[in-house]
Image (spheres, rainbow, N blue to C red):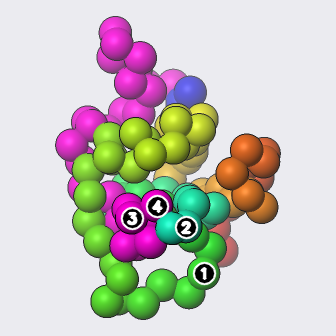
Amino acid sequence: MDVGRSADPDGWPFAEPRNVAVFTVRSVIVGSEPVLRVCHDTEDGGWQFLTGETVSMKEAMLVALSNIVERDRSLMELADLPLGWQASREAPGKQWIRKRMA
């Protein structure tokens, strides 16, 4: 975890509150696609939880961070993802690969 970040006593590892709005796509919310790419934006500190496919604005959604984490607890592993970095994986259960965004 980054210096300065502190998880709350009940195990929430993100520095952001549970109800912070994050970007995702409809297919993640309805459960037809898994999150395979996560971005932590430099400009605004925002989070994106995506399928790895090209995102259509008509499919984009804003949801609470806790809503995404409830669907996939492995996303908690990325709570310390630095600003300007992304993580991707081949499939659910596979290892997250982290890298700085270009």
| 50 relative position to 69: left or right | right
Residue tagged 2: 33
The amino acid type, in three-letter code, at marker 1 is Glu
Dots 4, 2 in contact, CB < 8 A = yes
The answer to which image quadrant residue 80 occupies is top right
| 84 relative position to 96: left or right | left
Say which residue appears at 21% left-offset and 43% top-offset.
Answer: 19
Dots 3, 4 in contact, CB < 8 A = yes
Say which residue appears at 32% left-offset and 41% top-offset.
Answer: 66
| 83 relative position to 12: left or right | right
Residue tagged 4: 31
The disc placed on residue 53 is 1
Dots 3, 1 in contact, CB < 8 A = no
Quadrant (top left/top right/bottom left/bottom right) for the N terminus? top right
Q: Does 91 lie within the magenta span? A: no
The amino acid type, in three-letter code, at marker 2 is Glu
